[in-house]
Amino acid sequence: MGLEGWRVFSAATILGILFFHGFCLSEKAPNYTFVHEATSAPDVSFYDYIIIGGGTAGCPLASTLSQNYSVLLLERGGSPYGNPNITNLNAFGAPLSDLSPSSPSQRFISEDGVINARARVLGGGSCLNAGFYSRASTSYVRDLGWDGKLVNESYEWVEKKVAFEPPVKQWQSAVRDGLIESGVRPYNGFTYDHLYGTKVGGTIFDQNGTRHTAADLLEYANPKGLTVLLHATVHKILFRTKGRSKPLAHGVIFRDAARIKHKAYLKAGARNEVIVSAGALGSPQLLMLSGIGPEDHLRHHNITVIYHQPFVGLGMYDNPMNAIYVPSPSPVEVSLIQVVGITRFGSYIEAASGENFAGGSASRDFGMFSPKIGQLSTLPPKQRTPEALAKAIDDMSKLDAVAFSGGFILEKTMGPLSNGYLMLRQKNPNANPSVTFNYFQEPEDLQRCVDGIKVIESIIESKSFSKFRYDDLTLQVLLNMTANSPVNLLPKHSNASTSLEQFCKDTVMTIWHYHGGCQVNRVVDEDYKVLGVDNLRVIDGSTFYDSPGTNPQATVMMLGRYMGVTMLNERLASEKSN
Ligand SMILES: Cc1cc2nc3c(=O)[nH]c(=O)nc-3n(C[C@H](O)[C@H](O)[C@H](O)COP(=O)(O)OP(=O)(O)OC[C@H]3O[C@@H](n4cnc5c(N)ncnc54)[C@H](O)[C@@H]3O)c2cc1C
Ligand SMILES: *[C@@H]1O[C@H](CO)[C@@H](O)[C@H](O)[C@H]1NC(C)=O
Ligand SMILES: *[C@@H]1O[C@H](CO)[C@@H](O)[C@H](O)[C@H]1NC(C)=O
Ligand SMILES: *[C@@H]1O[C@H](CO)[C@@H](O)[C@H](O)[C@H]1NC(C)=O
Ligand SMILES: *[C@@H]1O[C@H](CO)[C@@H](O)[C@H](O)[C@H]1NC(C)=O
Ligand SMILES: *[C@@H]1O[C@H](CO)[C@@H](O)[C@H](O)[C@H]1NC(C)=O
Ligand SMILES: *[C@@H]1O[C@H](CO)[C@@H](O)[C@H](O)[C@H]1NC(C)=O
Ligand SMILES: *[C@@H]1O[C@H](CO)[C@@H](O)[C@H](O)[C@H]1NC(C)=O
Ligand SMILES: *[C@@H]1O[C@H](CO)[C@@H](O)[C@H](O)[C@H]1NC(C)=O
């Protein structure tokens, strides 16, 4: 099989990784005077705006509103600064494999059986993600009725702080050229724009491999207008109902690291607001815990119903990700996503290569596709038990270093169309709700996956990619590869190597772009105001129907800025007219 060849390059690969990507310095903590532990907060405090969730949308929103108003930003996690697990590109797997309660990542497993992760840190998902930065298409922006000029200004505001051009090395270049050779054209070069064809996108990792995050957007804040509290978990939004036709959000209850309760209220002022930016799991969960959701479900959990809203928690989407591992006879660089093929049939092709180290230690890891972080495509989702996961991790630890020379070419199914729902399991906001995504329930999603896998096959077989594949490993063999190895993509159904449909279903993983649960025109209106109550908005990825662009974070950060500016402008106009 020519696999002996792996050995020859192993030492060089490992040295190369250590030398070029080894142990970068972590980013220096910025001089934020407004970030404090929640334990230092008073029992009761008052602000113009209270934002729940210091994540990818919450940080840019807080910075923007702080320009003219007093803002409280409550984040349940800690600071990302000074943590090399977050800051270093080659530690990608470390936070995702840290299952402790203090980890910046909280694992969750959907009812479908796919293992997934959600952020628990200031900066949110931008502290955990693979860094790829790419804008939404102009048609996405137009269809939502967003103001295109303000959208562009908001993207630029974000990009000035956190977006970079990646250093495209040999392996990523081969994927890029393979895409072009496979007909994913034209080649659009390096651009943030969403254009059909092949391109190099942006990244939040700088030239030194150091991650920049949404927390860096707090550098724009007015320090006099902003208070950020860490380890502040919001348990409930408070409403005033007496003598009102609509419940009015007027404060929140949160607990600090010592589990001490605090209250924060909106100052008197008709236009002061509470804003939920707790992400696609956190936002619908917190609305339900606060009494906004399907009444039967709330009653079942003994939650006082504030507003019966059957759509909260509906429309939960997670884009399926499927990948093929391609072992390489030549050394490969460590890379996260840099190149993307934007096809016309609704599949995005991306890739990642090389060995990642968990937490700077020399333990071998497949990075974005490691069982340590919960990726386990060797078994159909329902069979991904804790025992199966432990076995895959053990198997991986026994692999020869040479097995890590290679890369994954993945496809993300656009949209998707298939979706499910979120429900509470219990009243503790720290516990994960139950969530069902119904991967591939819609036949169009399955077709997009199959078509995507065919493009991946064509890339592997392209002339451009020849240096990074073993010629005697056919696609059939790759699909069916290496028993006893965690990169074995041999699914349990024996027909999966011949049926790409079955391959898609059996090897489905997440690319962590899950969204929905508080969608526009169902839970919030077009200004992101929660229907049925006053002074409450939701601004984050939970409002989306489709995942924007090829990867969502650019648009999530943009939305935080965009809505902050929109709210300031609306308020200025109304105050002028009064
Ligand atoms: C591993 C991984 C890889 C990814 N790769 C990419 C990529 O390469 N490119 C890309 O564009 N996108 C990527 N994504 C997706 C992207 O990062 C997310 O879509 C985005 O960060 C979601 O932003 P959000 O603001 O909706 O939620 P989050 O960023 O998750 O923010 C929600 C915040 O709210 C906090 N919170 C929740 N509940 C409470 C509460 N009750 N009280 C207080 N705080 C609370 C959370 O701790 C969190 O910080 C990836 C995501 C992950 C996890
Ligand atoms: C941090 O900022 C404050 C206020 O702007 C300033 O007084 C202080 O000197 C700064 N500290 C450092 C270490 O730069
Ligand atoms: C980094 O990640 C490793 C592995 O998951 C974990 O053991 C370690 O505690 C983490 N370090 C920090 C500073 O979070
Ligand atoms: C926004 O920028 C994109 C390019 O990134 C451009 O195609 C589009 O026309 C711009 N929209 C507006 C309204 O300026
Ligand atoms: C990369 O590191 C060098 C040397 O420490 C530093 O001068 C440079 O500013 C860093 N680049 C970025 C984008 O931070
Ligand atoms: C709801 O309250 C009732 C009566 O106090 C109790 O029996 C029941 O267990 C509670 N249910 C939940 C889900 O907490
Ligand atoms: C794939 O694996 C199955 C089950 O182990 C085996 O029967 C089949 O021959 C393999 N096919 C190829 C092309 O390797
Ligand atoms: C593959 O085999 C499984 C189990 O026998 C079966 O349920 C499934 O329908 C088959 N898939 C295809 C596409 O033939
Ligand atoms: C912010 O406040 C300043 C000073 O009060 C005022 O001049 C400006 O118009 C305000 N801007 C916005 C966007 O509210």
Image: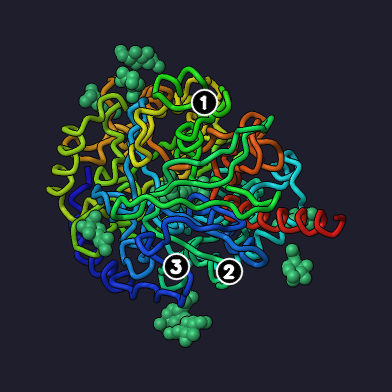
Q: What's the residue type where badge 3 is placed?
A: Val
The quadrant the C terminus occupies is bottom right
Which corner quadrant of the image does residue 535 belong to? top right
Q: Residues within 10 Å of mark 2 (few under 14, many from 20)?
A: many
Q: What's the residue type where badge 1 is placed?
A: Val
Q: Say if 262 sits above or below 238 in the image.
A: below
* Label located before the other in sequence (3 or 2): 3
Query: At numbered mark 1, what does the secondary structure look like: helix, strand or loop?
Result: loop
Check whether the beta carbons of the residues at disc 3 and disc 1 lie within 8 A of each other: no
Q: Mark 1 sits on what residue?
A: 305
Q: Say if 375 sits above or below 309 in the image.
A: below
Q: Residues within 10 Å of mark 1 (few under 14, many from 20)?
A: some
Q: Mark 2 sits on what residue?
A: 221
Q: Please name whichever residue, 166 or 237, is drawn nearer the observer in this view of the structure.
A: 237
Check whether the beta carbons of the residues at disc 3 and disc 2 lie within 8 A of each other: no
- Which of the numbered marks, if any, corresponds to residue 35? 3
Q: Position of residue 565 (x, y in %)?
A: 70, 58
